[in-house]
Every structure is written in structure tokens, then in C-alpha cells.
Image (spheres, rainbow, N blue to C red):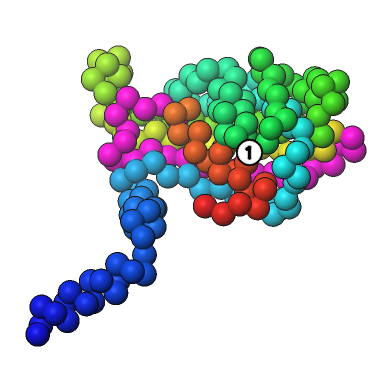
Amino acid sequence: MRSLVLLLAILALGGCMNVSDLGEGARYHMSDAGLLDHSDTHRSNSLRIQPDSFIYIAQGAFAPPGSANPRPNVVAEEAFNGFVEYFPMVRRARTPEGLDEAMTEARGAGAHYLLYTRFAKADDRIGNSDEWADQQAVDRLGIDSGVIQIMLIETSTQYLVDTARIHSRGGLLTFHDNAPEDLLGPPLEQYARSLLGLSD
């Protein structure tokens, strides 16, 4: 009798959630606990834009303070990769640009919006034997982290539609051979989804 009740309880619980929901819940809790990569995005507005909007993506030439040395245009590249799935009309600058130059190019391309980004902070910690051989500093062992800043500007009026700050950090199970720029893809894709009002 007891085993029958247990079997019925398991079947009832199994009917409430499917496997993908269980997997997503486990991933969320593991990232929140610091075992997997985690990001936290703060937006100034929750406005949505049209899916047929033409977005020009550029990155400022600002080099983040600290020991990290990310590729010069890596935020724009990762933003493009995250946005292209959700916005069919998207283009990015080939090299870092100042805000005025980026706005001029966005207008020249006929873009509705300029997505202007910068790598505000990057901390590349020792995560493998090669990095240990280079630095050999116990206080540099740990998990990579980074902060990027985003401005979404309407090109016709220069109205600041949204600003966002994304803080990313690695996880204890995923830090090996990672760098701060390796953490940018998922939160930038999620930011693109949030601009369309799509949930996780």
C-alpha cells in the first residue's frame, strides 16, 4: 500500500512538470549558487521594440581596467550573435567607434536604433595551468567576471530608449579555460529577447 501511494505521488509530480522545466530549474539554481556561469541584467526601462527594427551595433574603444585584455570589438561581436536570431535587420561596426561616429554610421545605414556597448570591467582570474605558469599568484586564482554597459538610442531623435548594465561571473564548474568575454553571449541574447518582451 505504501509503495502504491509513493508511486502515485511520483506520477502526480511528474505530470506537473516536464523534463525541460526540471532541467531549466536545476540550471537556474546551480548558476545562482555559483556552480555555473551567472549573469544579472539591470535595465532602466522595460520598453519593447518592434521585431522588424533595424539595429546597428557598435562598441566603444574603452579598454576595461584590470588585468584582462579582451578583443577590441568582442562585445559588439557577441551582441550581434545574440541579436541576429531575433532581429532580422541587424548590422555591427567592424571596429570600435566613438559614439558620434557610431551614430553617423547607424544613420547612414538607415538603422532605427543604435545599440552602443562598452566593456566597463573585466577580471580575468587564473583558471588553468598556463595562466598559473604566467602569473603564479595565489590571490589571482578564482572565477572570471565582467561588466558591460549598453545604451539603446533611437537614431532619428537621439532619444535614449534604454540603458542596461550586465554583470557576469563564471561558475565553479565552468571556470577552466574561460575568460570574461566568454561570459557575454547568453546575457546579450537574453537582452535581445527582453527587447521583444520574450520571457526566459
In this rendered view, identify the residue nearer to me: 2 or 35: 2
In this rendered view, identify the residue nearer to me: 87 or 103: 87
Q: Amino acid at mark 1?
A: Tyr
Inspect the magenta stretch and tell me whether residue 167 lies in it: yes
* Quarter of the N terminus within the rendering: bottom left
Q: Which residues are magenta?
A: 156-180
Q: Determine whether 197 is above or below 14 in the image.
A: above
Q: Answer yes or no: is residue 115 visible.
A: yes
In this rendered view, identify the residue nearer to me: 108 or 130: 108
- In the displayed orientation, state which residue is furthest to the bottom: 1
Q: Determine whether 2 is above or below 156 in the image.
A: below
Measuring from the top left, give residue 182's x and y in whole percent: 44, 29
Q: Secondary structure at mark 1?
A: loop
Q: Determine whether 12 is above or below 46 in the image.
A: below
Inspect the magenta stretch and tell me whether residue 44 lies in it: no
Q: Residues within 10 Å of mark 1 (few under 14, many from 20)?
A: some
Q: Answer yes or no: is residue 136 visible.
A: no
Measuring from the top left, give residue 33's x and y in whole percent: 33, 52
| Residue at the (22%, 77%) spot, across then down | 8
Residue 160: quarter of image: top right
Q: On the picture, is 27 further left or further right than 70?
A: left
| Residue at the (86%, 20%) spot, across then down | 108
In this rendered view, identify the residue nearer to me: 52 or 96: 52
Question: Residue tagged by mark 1?
Answer: 86
